[in-house]
Image: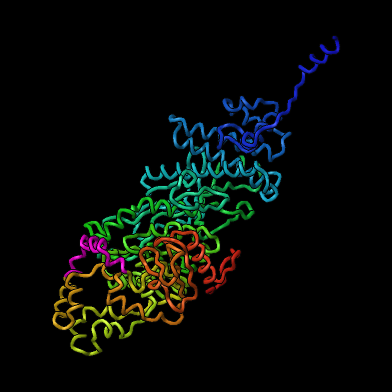
Amino acid sequence: MLPVLLAIQLGGCALVQVRQDDPRSYDENRRGDILTTGALSFATRNAIARLGLAPERCGGAATACIQALRAATLLDHDAQLAALAELTLGEALKADRAGAVSAPRRVGAYLDAARCAYAYLFFGDRSPRERAFEDRQTQVRDAYNYAVERVAALMFEQGQRAGRFHPPVPGSVEAIDGWQLRYGSIDLVLPRGAPKLEAMVPASRLRIDGLASVYRRDGLGAEVVMVARPAAGVAPSRMSPFADTGYLPATVLLRFPGASLAQVLDGHEAVVDALDPYRRDSTAVAGQVVPLAANFSAPYALWLADAGFGRKAIDNLLGRDNALDRPRVFLMQPYDPRRLTVVMIHGLASSPEAWVNLANEVMGDEALRQRYQIWEVYYPTNAPIPVNLVQIRAALAQTFAALDPLGTAPASHHVTLVGHSMGGVIARLLVVNSGDALWQRIFRAPVDSPRRKRLATLAPYLSITPLPGVDEAIFLAAPHAGTPIAGHWLARVVTRLIRLPKTLLETSARIAEVLAGELPEQAALFRTAPTGVDLLRDSSPYLRATSTLPIVDGVRYHSIIARRSAGVPLAESTDGFVPYASAHLAGAASEKIIMSGHSVQETPQAILEIRRILREHAGVGPADTAPPAQGAR
C-alpha cells in the first residue's frame, strides 16, 4: 500500500503537463497577438517570462514590462524588440480607445509602437529576408503597418481641423507630442479639378462586397485610399471630357533616422512617405529593398459604391432631368504616359459598373497592372449610336490630346478598345473608315449632289474615321448587324419612355423635313427622332450600312460571343438578345464562344480570355510579370 500512496503523492507534484491542441486553438495560440485577438502573442509571453515577469500582469501594467524589456540584456534583440513592438502597440490601442486621451498623445503612442517595430524589422539580429518564414516577423510587420495607418489617419484629421486640405510639401516638418515629423517622398497629386483632399480611408478596415476578388500586395506600409473628387456643379460646357475617379491608392511609410539600434530607439524623429503603389512595387528602407503593401481593389470599389451608377444607368436611358448629356472618360488610376491604354465602352442601359470584375481582374493581374491603365467611357445610351459614336470619339481624342499633347507617349499608341453590346458596336465603328459609303447606301447622295448639301448637318455622323492609336479591339456580345429584340413590343414600350435632348430633337426634325418627299422611309425614321434602342434593330438602315464596313488595316480584333444553349446550331444560336450571326465577324484574330446570357463580360471565361489577349498584346508570357520592355507592343 505504501508504494501506491507514494506514487500518487509524487504524481501530484508534476509541474509539466502536455496535451494536444485542436488546429484552431494552435493557430490562435501561435499566431494570435494583441492586434488580432487582444491578447499578447506566444512569442511576447515567452520573452516576458524569460525576464522573470508574469505575462498576464503586463496587460494591465505594461509600462513596467516595457521598461524591463528596454533594460534587458539577456534577451536577444529580435525577442526584445518584437515584444516591445507588441506591448507599445497595446498601449497605443488603449490610448486610442480612451476618449480622454488627446490626439497628439495618441499619435505619440503609435509613433513609439511603429519605432519599436521598425527597429525589429531593420535593426534586429537578422535581416527580414533571414526571418521570412517566422510568424513573429509577420506579426511585427502587421503591428508596424497598423501603427503607421493610425498615425497617418490621426495626422490627416488634425490637418483637416487646421484647414490643411492639400498633400503635405516634401521637406516640411510638424511637431507633435515631442516628435518631429518630416515629410519625405510624397507621390500624391490632386486629380484635375479636385479642390482638396477630402478623406483618407484605411483600406484594412474595408469590407468589399460585389467584387469576385480583392487584390492586395503584402508588404510594408499602411494601405490607404485618398479621396479627392473633382468639384461638383461645373457647367457642362466647361466640363472636361475626362476625369480621374478621385480615389487614389497610397502606401504610407514611417522611417526612423539612425545608423544604429540605439539611435533609432533613442530618437524622436520620423520621416513620413506617401507612395503611389501603381508606380512603385518596392522601396529602400534602412538600406534594404522591401515590397510595398498595396490594395488595388479598394479605390475602385469605393468609387463604384459612391457613384451610384446602377440608378443612373436607367436615368440615362430614359433621359430624365438628371441624366448624363454627353460622354465622360473616367481614368481608373492617375494617368501614366508609360502604360498602354485600355478603353472600355459599356452597353445599352448600362454604366461603368458593367466592367466591375473585368477591370478589377486586370488591375489585379500584376503583369497587366504594370503595363496597362484602364479608361472607362460613360455615355448616355438613350442617344442614337451615330451621335454617341461622334461624341465618344471626340471625348477620347480630346483626352489623349490633353494628356499627351505631342502624341509621343506609349499611352497614346497601341490602344485596346473593349466594348460590350451597344458599346461593342461603337468600339467597332471607332476602327473603320466609311469614306463615301454611308452617304451612298443610306441616302443615295453622291459627293456634290444637292441632296448631300441639304443634309450637311449629317456629315459628322456619316463620315466615320478611325480613332488614332488603336491597334487592338475586343467585342463582347456586340450586335454589329442589329438585333430583332430591339423591335420587340417591350422594346417599343421602353422606347416611348425615352426622352432625347431638345437639340437632338430639333436636328432630327430638320433632317426629316429635308428628306420628306424624296426618301420617305428615312424621313419617317427621323420624324420620330431615333433613340439608342431604335438603331439597334436589325432593320436599322444605319446598322445595315455600317455592319459591312471593313475594319482598317493594322487593327487586330477579337469576338467574344455568348450562346444560351448548346442544343441549337451555333449559326442559329443567340444569347437571348444578340444572334450569333450579328456578333460574328469574319477575319477576327480569335472568336471565343461562351455558354452565357447577354452579360457575358461578367463571366470568368470572358475575363480570362481578355486577360490572355491583353498579355499577348503587350508581349507578356503566361507567367511573366517582369516590367515591360521599352516600346513593347
| Residue 491 image offset from top left, x and y in percent | 26, 63
Q: Is residue 543 visible?
A: yes
**Residue extent of the magenta highlight:** 484-505
* Residue toward you, 465 or 424: 424
Q: Is residue 344 magenta?
A: no
Q: Nearer the viewer, residue 270 or 630?
A: 630
Front residue of 184 and 195: 195
**Count of numbered badges drawn on the protein:** 0
> Which residue occupies the foreground of this view, 179 or 335?
335
Quarter location, residue 470 = bottom left
Tell me where residue 5 appears, x and y as whole percent. 81, 11
Q: Is residue 42 left or right of residue 355?
A: right
Q: Left or right of 586: which side holds 39?
A: right
- Looking at the rendered image, the quarter that the N terminus falls into is top right
Residue lying at 26% horizontally and 69% vertically, measured from the top left = 534
- The reply to whether residue 532 is visible in this rendering is no
Q: Position of residue 251 (x, y in %)?
A: 51, 52
**Which residue is painted at 57% across and 48% down in the image?**
255
| Vertical relation: 402 (above or below) 85 | below
Residue reaching furthest bottom? 448
> Is residue 356 positioned above or below 205 on the image?
below
Q: Is residue 301 above or below residue 42?
A: below
Residue at point 67%, 30% (across, down): 48
Q: Percent position (x, y) of residue 50?
A: 71, 30
- Color scheme of the displayed model: rainbow
Residue 501: in magenta span: yes
* Name of the residue lying farthest toward the top: 1
Position of 5 with respect to 209 (left or right) is right
| Majority secondary structure of magenta residues | helix
